[in-house]
Amino acid sequence: MKQNLYKYILGIADNSLILGQRLGELTGHGPSLETDIACTNISLDFFGQVRSYYQYAAKIAGDKRTEDDIAMLRKEREYVNVLLVEQPNTNFAYTIARQFLFDVYHFLFLTELEKSKDLTLSAIATKSLKEVSYHQRFSTDWLKRLGDGTAESKEKMQEAIDGLWTYTDELFHQTEADKAMVLEGIGVDVTKLKEAYYKKVDEVLSEATLETPESKWFQKGGKQGIHTEHLGYLLSDLQYMQRTYPNMEW
Amino acid sequence: MSKNWPLWEVFVRSKNGLEHRHCGSLHAADEDMALENARDVYTRRSEGVSIWVVESKNITASNPENNGEMFEPAHDKVYRHPTFYDLPDEVKHM
């Protein structure tokens, strides 16, 4: 089995899975009917993407595990998503900030992944890019709307950006599997996306009349399976059905 | 929150060549948000290739109380339907 490729795919897929689950929590709880549906649409885009990734990972693994086993039955420490995507829906400003900070990265990442020598990953990237372009448009519009809105919305939006800022740098960390995949022309060198990312984020924040945080102290660990306390609760929701009724199907 | 947002009417064209059809309404703060909300609420099952939104207050509607004088006079004027012509057999799809 191609161990590095397998790990590399999980590194991409877990981000989408966990963020998709977070957005899915808003089903029926969004601030308005329209934003509720928008967030769950985005969630479903992510779940569509992760199916392609996990199906591919299951094929690479070559054992009896299916896409569902890989998605649903790992332990917390075996998930390698970045810390940013597991942060809770504290309020709508946090939901938008988390989405925006991830979307800008995700778009840059997929644009590069499209050039991968691995044709499956390249094809998934092409398909996902249209969805992610819309995600970015949605979160950017809301960021500007709330940042440049009322005094209260501006304060909340700034607080959310400040609160999540510490999780942005991890997006550009490389694991050993990442480095190996870059050498093979399959993976994306995320360190090269960093400059474009912070430039874009800074542009949008200033358009939204918000301050770009100056803190240089960043959290990390997600890519090594060391998570914030929030992931365990999320997984207990996500995995409940499969753990309680093993092998159940719809 | 949405209580403060105005109401918009949404028209979706399902295919090129067909007309935009009214499919519902939604709340939004302005036209950009209305368009995005319409995309999310009314085209998520591939219903459309084009969307129009118009703020509901800009639509002038007939008053149902006047339905008698507005519409009943047409009921007994069947000759306004083009059904009194003999069509040649060659003409299809009429």
Image: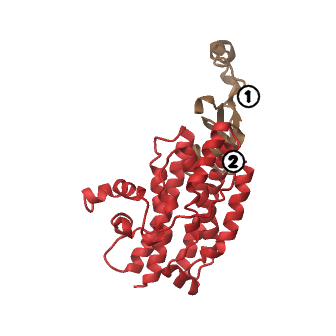
A152 and A134: which is toward the camera: A152
Give the answer, above or below, for where A187 lies relative to B33.
Answer: below
How many neighbours does mark 1 have within 10 angstroms: few (below 14), some (14-19), or many (20 or more)? few
Quadrant for the N terminus of chain A, please.
bottom left
Q: Name the chain letter of the residue that bears numbered label 2.
A: A
Q: Residue furthest bottom?
A: A184
Q: Colour of chain B?
A: brown
Q: Is residue B94 visible?
A: no
Q: Residue furthest left?
A: A245
Dot label at residue A247: none
> Disc 2 to disc 1, how far (Cα)?
27 Å
| A246 with respect to A101 (left or right) | left
Specify how the rendered protein is coloured. by chain
A174 and A10: which is toward the camera: A174
How many neighbours does mark 2 have within 10 angstroms: few (below 14), some (14-19), or many (20 or more)? some
User: Residue at the spot x=56%, y=64% of the render?
Assistant: A218
Q: Amino acid at mark 1?
A: Asn
User: Residue at the spot x=54%, y=54% of the render?
Assistant: A42
Based on the displayed image, in which of its 4 quarters is residue A189 positioned?
Answer: bottom right
Reading the image, the residue beneath label 2 is: A144
Find residue B92 and report its horizontal and vertical position in percent: 65, 46
Q: Name the chain letter of the residue that bears numbered label 1.
A: B
Quadrant for the C terminus of chain A, please.
bottom left
Dot label at residue B58: 1
Helix, strand or loop at label 2? It is helix
Find residue B36 and report its horizontal and vertical position in percent: 64, 46
Mark whose residue sits in front, 2 or 1? 2
Find residue A85 and report its horizontal and vertical position in percent: 50, 59
Q: Amino acid at mark 2?
A: Lys
| Marks 2 and 1 on same chain | no
User: Residue at the spot x=58%, y=60% of the render?
Assistant: A102
Letter of the chain in red = A
